[in-house]
Amino acid sequence: MKLKKIKALFLTFTFILTSTVPVFADTNVSRIAGKDRYETALKTTQKFFNKANGNLGVLVSGNDFKGALYASQLANALNVPYFVNEKHGIKTSTLNEMARLGIKTIYVIGDYEYLDKSIDNTLLSRQIKIKRVTNNMKDHYYEDIPGFVDITIFNTLWNDDAKGDISNAILINDNKFPDLLSVIPFTSLLARKYKMALYPFRYNEEYPIKDGYGFIIGGSDSIPPDYVSLHSDEFLLGLVKETWIDEEGNYGECYSGRLAGGDRYQTAVEIAKAYKPVLNKDINTAIIVNGENYADALSSGTVAMHTNGAILLTRSNKLNKNTKQYIQDNNIKNIIIVGGESSVSKDVENELRALN
């Protein structure tokens, strides 16, 4: 018997009216912050880890946002501690935390212009093995940081399986840091559950395949409109749901689509909305970060992964209206700000506390 397929378009900005009466509770707003991006990341690790999974950790540069965010994908997919470091040397507080967690191997993610050789030497002097990953690798399987992250996640979690085709790719313009920041927890979970890989789009390269991607992140200003997802044949914002009934009568479904909004703030909201249909995951924590200055937000992916949260963006001194609306519409009562008051001000914190 042939499979019965039904396509239904689900635009994530559709309004759904219900007769459910919301139950209001006090909003819990907390903040994870250190004196700088390095201490904020360290406090995050101290809060959420008691032991390093597989005795493994990831160390990144606090000045290479792109590399640091790809490394966050690696750390979060593998559920291992994530450290943000300065160019030269490693602070005693960071080394003590590595010792507390029992770390024996570190992926050092970043070119030497961002993390110099003193990093390697310090770790080796502590009997910690290192794997240095740069954007000029000459490995048979990968040649840059995104490639290493993809292969390492796959080989660790899915080593005995086939890797899959382009439908397992999440295409993103990684020069759009706000989109990359917002999507990391979502893509980390997709890597764990569905073997999906975060794949960088490059304007200066010709991509022979323009359709069939699992997900595309960002609007037409990020990735041209002729690039479409698996179940679409035209430029379309939102999720597309594919359903079927197999020969044994079992129901199945999957999603693909382009997740994007009118700006970085709305794109983050559209990503947050996708957790439930795509991953069957209810978001009950909003992770609030600065959508214009990303330094303090580098460790926000770890916070989201450990709190059943999604990353939402705001300006430093005023809560973004789309972010506010998402929190209210979903009755989210647990909110964690990542970063100090120079990143997300006390005024924004007070706005969040006043939500009901």
Image (tube, rainbow, N blue to C red):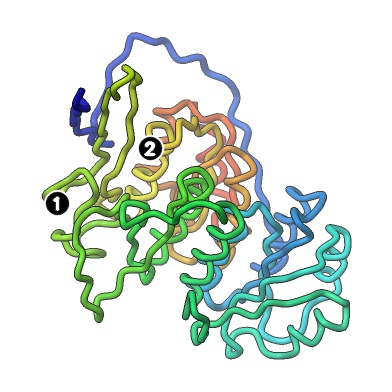
Mark 2 or mark 1: name the one nearer the start of the chain: 1
Instruction: Find residue 341 and name its label.
Output: none
Q: Evaluate whether residue 199 shows in this view.
A: yes
Residue shown at 52% from the left, 71% from the top: 148
Q: Position of residue 211 (x, y in %)?
A: 20, 56
Q: Position of residue 182 (x, y in %)?
A: 45, 54
353 is higher (above) or lower (below) than 343? above
In front of the other: 130 or 158: 158
**Left or right relative to 256: residue 139:** right
* Quadrant including the N terminus: top left
- Residue carrying label 2: 273
* Mark 2 vs mark 1: in front: 1
| Mark 2: secondary structure | helix
Q: Position of residue 6 (x, y in %)?
A: 19, 27
Q: CA distance from mark 2 to mark 1?
A: 20 Å
Q: Evaluate whether residue 36 shows in this view.
A: no
Instruction: Find residue 235 and name its label.
Output: 1
Q: Amino acid at mark 2?
A: Lys
